[in-house]
């Protein structure tokens, strides 16, 4: 990739610190045409203040009109073209829980779901079954045995789990079994490429046995599989940017993605305040800090507009704690939009702000979707955000004579 070659060529060392706060699914929509989005409704004095001294814009995670998953969305933010570097969700989840994928492994992210008597999906997330309950269900799935293939089933969090198939001749190009709708049956795992026929057959047998084992479960009596993938090969943050990078995340998937791009996982925080505590503790040890906040996404997916507003306000309240550490560049953005109105990820550009002493202020006084559309960065590819971060941190030399 020519952009990465240029980044390696121009990257310079200094003592600057870059913080990227990713509010998952940050962007939204009004519930009525003349209404406000979740971000516009929230009281965000600290984010507004940052917007006034920084530069804002609207980032496009993949391409205009394309709705991204969380993996591609984050890859873009980290400066990796998601059309060139593809990571399946299974690999992210497996790596995030500390499962070391081998060369003969294919991983898939599993979601427990609730099936009705007709075998159709009544609840896509099994009522967001608590982790302590789902872990017991995962334990029952250890009984699945498939000839010629090792099968590993590991719990993740709440309704999520990981299944890893290990064997010769496996290929990750298998379609998801999640129809992403209720009132319909889970799909069969089908090969997207002929080379993945064996993997699809293995996955189908896994689902068959698992369904029999789970038949009497009150909530998690079914499952869907997503993001079949082998372990990818990515250049690391240190190789690309010369940055010692740290990740402070709660959910395993985002830990996995950070590890796959060479970030070091820091601490075991479970709350936003604990994440800021960890940020302060490791401040002197790293140059770049990725801080992930999940709940702006999950509330959007639940269609909980008011709850998403509260989560945005929760994020706003910790901004002064981050500022107190005096980062040279502070970015607040999202990996994609998740409007409560749609109850899903969407294609809408994501509000993004970058605050630094090297900014050219764009005259905005609020951080919101409408304001960011008028920001100085305009509507730009998310994969360029790290270039802007490096430039504002004065970590790039001049290109050409």
Image (cartoon, rainbow, N blue to C red):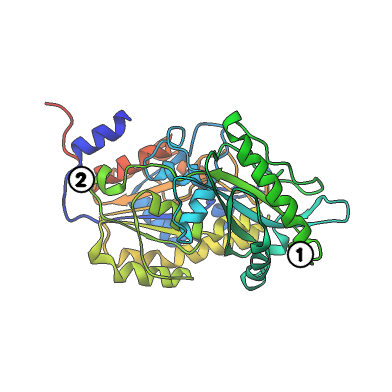
Q: Quick check: can you spot residue 34?
A: no
Height in image: 41 above or below 268?
above
How many marks do you count on the picture? 2
Taking depth in this image into account, of 137 and 272 the one nearest to the observer is: 137
Height in image: 392 above or below 137?
above
Disc 1 designates what residue? 219
Mark 1 Cα-neighbour bin, 10 Å: few <14, some 14–19, many ≥20: many
Q: Quick check: can you spot residue 181?
A: yes
**What number is the disc on residue 105?**
none
| Residue 191 drawn at (x, y percent) | 64, 34
| Residue 225 drawn at (x, y percent) | 65, 49
Residue at left offset 52%, top offset 31%: 64
Residue at left offset 47%, top offset 63%: 315
The C terminus sits in image quarter:
top left
Which of pointers 1 and 2 indicates the residue nearer the eye?
1
Q: Secondary structure at mark 2?
A: loop
| Residue 5 drawn at (x, y percent) | 26, 33
Q: Secondary structure at mark 1?
A: loop
- Name the side, left or right, on which 77 lies relative to 327: right
Disc 2 designates what residue? 395
The N terminus sits in image quarter:
top left
Give the CA separation, mark 1 to mark 2.
Answer: 51 Å
> Please, which residue is most extreme toward the right here?
117
Residue at left offset 59%, top offset 35%: 196
Mark 2 Cα-neighbour bin, 10 Å: few <14, some 14–19, many ≥20: many
Taking depth in this image into account, of 143 and 274 the one nearest to the observer is: 143
């Amino acid at each position: 990739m020519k952009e990465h070659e240029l980044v390696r060529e121009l990257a310079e060392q200094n003592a600057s610190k870059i913080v990227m706060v990713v509010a998952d699914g940050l962007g939204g929509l009004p519930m009525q045409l003349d209404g406000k989005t979740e971000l516009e409704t929230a009281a965000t004095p600290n984010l507004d203040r940052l917007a006034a001294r920084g530069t804002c814009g609207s980032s496009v995670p993949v391409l205009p009109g394309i709705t991204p998953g969380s993996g591609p969305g984050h890859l873009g933010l980290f400066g990796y073209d998601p059309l060139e570097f593809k990571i399946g969700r299974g690999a992210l989840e497996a790596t995030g829980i500390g499962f070391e994928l081998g060369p003969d492994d294919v991983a898939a992210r599993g979601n427990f779901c609730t099936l009705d008597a007709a075998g159709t999906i009544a609840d896509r997330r099994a009522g967001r079954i608590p982790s302590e309950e789902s872990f017991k269900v995962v334990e029952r799935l250890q009984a699945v045995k498939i000839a010629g293939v090792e099968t590993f089933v590991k719990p993740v969090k709440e309704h999520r789990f990981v299944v890893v198939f290990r064997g010769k001749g496996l290929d990750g190009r298998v379609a998801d079994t999640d129809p992403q709708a209720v009132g319909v049956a889970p799909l069969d795992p089908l090969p997207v490429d002929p080379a993945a026929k064996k993997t699809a057959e293995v996955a189908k047998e896994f689902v068959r046995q698992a369904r029999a084992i789970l038949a009497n479960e009150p909530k998690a009596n079914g499952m869907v599989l997503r993001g079949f993938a082998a372990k990818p090969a990515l250049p690391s943050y240190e190789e690309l940017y010369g940055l010692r990078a740290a990740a402070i995340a709660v959910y395993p998937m985002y830990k996995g993605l950070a590890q796959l791009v060479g970030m070091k996982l820091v601490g075991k925080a479970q709350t936003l305040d604990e994440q800021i505590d960890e940020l302060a503790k490791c401040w002197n040890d790293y140059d770049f800090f990725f801080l992930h906040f999940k709940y702006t996404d999950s509330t959007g997916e639940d269609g909980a507009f008011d709850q998403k507003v509260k989560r945005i306000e929760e994020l706003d309240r910790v901004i002064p704690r981050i500022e107190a550490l005096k980062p040279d560049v502070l970015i607040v953005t999202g990996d994609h939009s998740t409007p409560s109105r749609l109850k899903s990820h969407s294609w809408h550009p994501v509000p993004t702000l970058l605050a630094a002493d090297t900014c050219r202020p764009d005259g905005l006084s609020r951080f919101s979707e409408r304001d960011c559309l008028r920001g100085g960065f305009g509507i730009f590819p998310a994969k360029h955000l790290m270039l802007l971060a490096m430039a504002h941190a004065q970590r790039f030399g001049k290109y050409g004579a």
